[in-house]
Image (tube, rainbow, N blue to C red):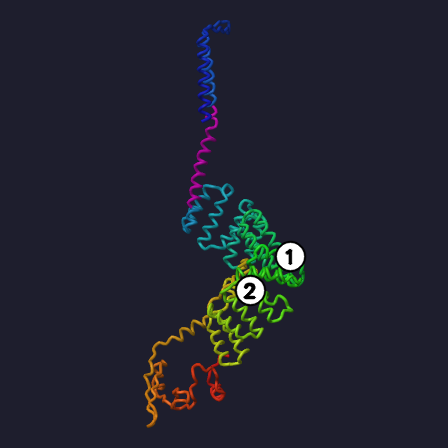
Amino acid sequence: MIRILFFLAVVFGLGLGFAWLADRPGDMVVTFGGYQYQVSLMVAAVAVTAIVVAVMLSWWLTKSLWNSPYAIARHFRARRRDRGYQALSTGMIAAGAGDAALARKKNKEAAKLIRFDQEPLIQLLDAQAALLEGDHDGARQKFEAMLDDPEMRLLGLRGLYLEAERLGDRSAARHYAGRAAGLAPQLAWAADSTLEEKAERGDWDGALALVDAQKATRQIERDVANNRRSVLLTAKAMSLFESDFNTARTAALEANRLRPEFGPAAIVAAKALFRQNDVRKGSKALEGAWKAEPLPDVAELYVHGRPGDAVLDRLARAKKLQSLKQNHPESSLAVARAALEAQDYALARAEAEAAARMQPREGAYLLLADIEEAETGNQGKVRQWLAKAVRAPRDPAWVADGVVSERWAPFSPVTGRLDAFEWKAPEERLGHLIEQQDEEPEARVAIPAIRAAQPAGDDIVEVESDVEVMPEKATETATAKVVPPTPDGVAGVVDEDKAEPIRLPDDPGVDPEVERENAQRRFRLF
């Protein structure tokens, strides 16, 4: 646009100049070689303009002829380069689509048309084609060759890192990631891998510095950075709690400030505050974590926060904790445990049964077994609760990548991923599934009603059995006979070969003689 305006301005200026000369007629006399030439001023101006134009055209033509070999070579070189880039583009698309044959073909074509030093992407396409063909050794060699080129060094490190991850060599992968993070801290994959490596080595300060660098360069969001810092500070406080208490206390308080709902951070912060007899602040930290996620360790530390408290005081603290998170199984279990310590068996049983109704799981049934043993000592009922505990779903625990841990850890022991542990119920045990399948019968028959006549003068007692047995045992069971009614008015069904009376269904007691007689031929869980 500017060039057009400039051209129009020049034409307009020339027009004005010729118009001005036309309005002012005159002659121009030129004496040259003894001759005198006289022409009008307009003709002289046109002649001068024509001479200038002719000189300029002659110069352009001479220059074009002189530079024609170079121009022709440049034209063919540009055409060759365009073909090479077209082949490179097609090869990269083929590599992304998984077409190894086309990628290799276009790589060779691009290598012929473009030199490696002119376009580093040819090396990348070569390595990608080798990976698609399954030549991992050749691909690693190509990635290692990229390390000598400053422009391709990060790409080579990335390729070597991925190959080490594929082979399961975590130490080599983290070595390459560390080199890449040193060259370019903004690389997320390198920074994350280096962060995991520092966490596994216990270099908490180095890991925290790396998180701060990621936050400063806006690689990660502020919330993500705070969560990572909280995890690292919690791990640092736990590792230094006994050796360097002041540093551990500072780290624990900062971790709890960054993430108040994080249970492990609240626990280690509360322990530090309790050690300094600051029960109020420690309790508030635990209460904040309890509202977000009730954990048994939080309840245990909260209830026993003051070592000198009586059992009734601990029960009162458990009830206060329950008021913060009502209608939750962990709240009921916390009160039940404190009530059991205070020997308030009625409250302990009520809360434990409430927890079992809200979430049937082994911990609630085990607590009910403890309550039963402490209150009545009835081993039959204790075994009932223990049997339910064996078949009940498992209690929640810290789970990361299939690993179940009783204690929280900052990283996964399998993958090394930071903040991988989650508080949730582990996968069901295989034994439970097998038992459930075994309990479903393939075919069952019901025992017909057994009618037995008593001697003359007695009433006729009719006993119907709703017990279901397997077909092969139907005949054996049908030989049972009816005995006279007991003083309570209940008839019993016994086997002909055994004279032992059958106990009532609601009687959990065990006869000592029968226990000794069947001890050798009975399977016992406990």
Main SS of residues in magenta: helix
Q: Please count the marks in the image.
A: 2
Q: Is residue 501 magenta?
A: no
Q: Secondary structure at mark 2?
A: helix
Q: Amino acid at mark 1?
A: Thr
Q: Position of residue 179 (x, y in %)?
A: 58, 51
Q: Nearer the viewer, residue 322 or 419?
A: 322
In which quadrant will I find the N terminus?
top left
Q: Are marks 2 and 1 in contact (CB under 8 Å)?
A: no
Residue 400 against residue 133 in the figure, above or below = below
Q: Position of residue 522 (x, y in %)?
A: 46, 83
Residue at position x 52%, y 59% from top? 168
Q: Position of residue 128 (x, y in %)?
A: 46, 50
Residue mark closest to the camera, 2 vs 1: 2
Q: Nearer the viewer, residue 76 or 38?
A: 38
Q: Is residue 62 magenta?
A: yes
Report crowding for label 1: few under 14, some 14 to 19, many 20 or more residues within 10 A (C-alpha): some
Q: Secondary structure at mark 1?
A: helix
Question: Which residue is labeled 1 in the image?
Answer: 250
- Residue 83 placement, left or right of 252: left
- The magenta segment is 61-90
- On residue 38, which mark appears? none
Query: Is there any visible trace of residue 323 in the rendered image?
Result: yes
Question: Which residue is labeled 2 in the image?
Answer: 321
